[in-house]
Amino acid sequence: MSHSVENRFFAIVCGALLVFVAPLFILFLFLSSERAEKEIKDHITVLLVANAQALAKPLWDLDEDSVTQISATTVAEGAIVRVNVRDLSGQLDVTQSTIPKSYKGNLESVSRPIIYNGVDGAKKLGTITVYYPELGLFDGLKNEEIVFISIFIFAVLTVFGAALIGNRIFVIQPLMRLTHAIEATRRLGSRHHVDWQSSDEMGRLASSFNDMQSKLQREETELKFAHRRATDTYNLTPAMLFSLDKDDCIAAVSDYWLAATGYDRAEVLGRRFASLVLPDSRSEYSERKHDNPDSAARLAVTVKFLCRDERVMDVLILETTAIQDGLSLSVMTDVTELKQSEDRNLRQAITDHLTGLLNRQGFETALDAKINEADLRKRELACLFIDLDRFKWINDNMGHAAGDAALRELVARLQECLKPGDIAARLGGDEFAILLLAEDAEARAFDMSARIAEIFEAPFEGDARLSASIGIAIYPRHAANAAELLLKSDIAMYAKKRDGKNGAQIFDNGMLDDSRSRAELESNIESGLNEDWFEAYLQPIVNIDDRSVAGFEALMRLNHPQKGILPPARIIEVAEETGSIVRIGNRIMEKAIASFAKLSRLDGMEDTYLAINFSPLQFEPELPVRIAALLSRYDILPRRIVVEITEAVLMDDNPETRMVINEICRYGCRIALDDFGTGYSSLSYINRFPVDIIKIDQSFIRAINDTASDVSAKSRMLVESITTLSHKMNCTVIAEGVETEEECATLRTMGIDYGQGYLFYRPQHPDNLMKIWTGLIQAHPTPVAQAS
């Protein structure tokens, strides 16, 4: 087997001899045999001719002895081994043979007729047949031919032997060395070299093999080094590395993985990785390949891993999708603290940090879940939207710390009213919401509302008193989804606030009309600000005695291009709730001052004043500067501007508001207390704040001549008392809403200073007022108020 190359070479040479040399040799023998056979036949032919003539006379005479003698002479020839002479009559048949009995070869025969030439002519007497051995390929060879063949065979054998020897020396021997080197490399793992040097192909082959061995040895060394480095990297990298086979069984783990998990390598190798994952996340791990797209470069899954010491780690597993040799490489990272942090962040994201209740985001998520639960359990879900009344007063007067304490105390009381399954949330500020799942959600909601009302019976810390307005909406009776349910409970809550606060109101469809009307009004307000629909109408204020004009009150009007003048009271209410009252107030103030500057140029108007109403929301630190800038622009003295404020501004006693009012007074403007006599009216405001003008509310003015004598008497007493005390405190008194001459006469007797109402003037656009007043000046040098 090891000499297969040599055997093949031997077979090739033998084949070449058989293919090329043997046919030539056989052809030579064949030609030599034909030549020898031809010579024998020619010789036998000559003998036959001579013997046939010699036998003619004896055969004629039937001389058997002569025939026998001649036949014997013929057989004596070297080539002929048998002679048969037979006459035609059959009387004479002589056969002579020299063939030994052991001869088994074939004989060739040649016959010739024996003809006797007599007097009567030629007569055929019989035949003579001679036999000679059939010649083989070598029987016809001559001595010189045998010598030639011997030399030829020797030459061929010499060449054949030389080829074999040369092949063994120059081919087989280096091949054997190369084979031994390869076998030694295979068996021993060492890189053996071939000790053979020559300039032929074998030398180049040996040199190439030696170079290849050297290169392989270098690469093997580098590979071993790389493998050792990779192994060290795998084991020493501070990451939990492991490899899985195609059946998700552990094929390898790093030392760091073992150190982090506490397992021994022997007890985890071959074990299914899923068996180390907690059952509640095992399915998630098993489905990781299905949950990730096939094109993903890696698979990522977070599961709970059970360590050997029963510790549970949240681990993030990143697994390569490219698998080599049936193995995948994965890295496992301990994200327990991260998951805990995420859970904390999630709780913080959905929890109100002050009260511990759900915030708006958490409530919206819980609301969706509760609606799904209500659908599954075929129950109703009540949403209670709670807004605290007078909570702003606590923040403004007792401080935000007191407000926060009140909210925490409220939540503590509220928790005692909740049952398992109820959900409470703080939506923001002083707004809360509660979800109640029940078969009769409406009854449960009103029962909860009653309990909440009881919460507010006891005062809160600091003797603070609160109440709540509650709106109720029922799913699926009032709403089809979470957003609609929350919206309609909010609408119901605002309806309760408009009806007097402190109680519960369930939603009905009529509230939607109010909501749509409010939304339309909000849109009109915004459009009015953007399109400049707001106008500053002016209503004159007259001296109650001679009805001369003392000043003007600026009144807001929204002139809609299609709907005309919209009711101002509702606009102010909505604007204060949305906060747009500040922009409206600034717009009206600027237009009113500009129009007042034009009126001031008319004769008799130089000493009049302009009263401007301000919402509590307008008392910002920038207000005094804004007023000063406008008065400077239109060249109006500050004493001609009266800032009208309501009791709500003074009742809160906000330090920032007090500072703004004081700045306005120092600048030179006067302060008027509007609608005095309503709400929590107190003359102490006049003492605590720099008030210059008191405006008595029109409800008292209308009641002074009431048909009921007791109502009329009380109203007159109140108006007289307010007037007397105001005058004692150097405040001017103005009666609002004067509409009849009877009222005007009564007010005059009470000592009222000024009047304002439809009896004198209606609120007018400044342009119309300019035209009217110009006509009055032309008719009367001293303008006198006329009914308009």
Image (cartoon, rainbow, N blue to C red):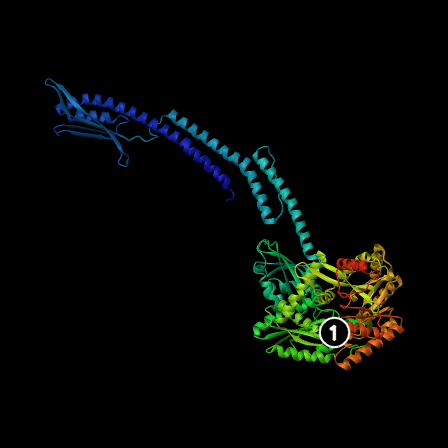
The residue labelled by disc 1 is 389
Looking at the image, which residue is at 28% across and 25% down? 40
Find residue 781 and report its horizontal and vertical position in percent: 84, 60
In terms of depth relative to the viewer, which is nearer, 289 or 505?
505
Residue 140 in sight in this render:
no
Q: In which quarter of the image is residue 472?
A: bottom right
Q: Is residue 101 left or right of residue 15?
A: left
| 568, 394: nearer the viewer | 568
Q: Is any part of residue 20 visible from this angle?
A: yes
Q: Residue furthest left?
A: 120
Q: Find residue 217 and report its horizontal and vertical position in percent.
A: 64, 45
Above/below status of 507 relative to 84: below
Query: Residue 390's spot in the image, x, y percent?
Result: 76, 73
Which quadrant holds residue 503? bottom right
Question: Which residue is at the front of the view, 351 or 281?
Answer: 351
Percent x, y of residue 695: 81, 70
User: Does residue 455 lie above or below 243 as drawn?
Assistant: below
Q: In this view, does 136 lie to the left or right of 176?
A: left
Which residue is rendered at x = 77% and y = 81% of the image? 709
Local packing at callout 1 (Cα closer than 10 Å; few below 14, some 14-19, many 20+) is some
**Quarter of the image holding residue 518?**
bottom right
Q: Which amino acid does label 1 sit on?
A: Asp
Mark 1 lies on a secondary structure that is: strand
Q: Residue at x 45, y 38 (%)?
A: 11
Q: Quadrant of the C terminus?
A: bottom right
162 or 241: which is nearer to us?
241
- Farthest front residue? 779
Most extreme residue toward the top is: 119
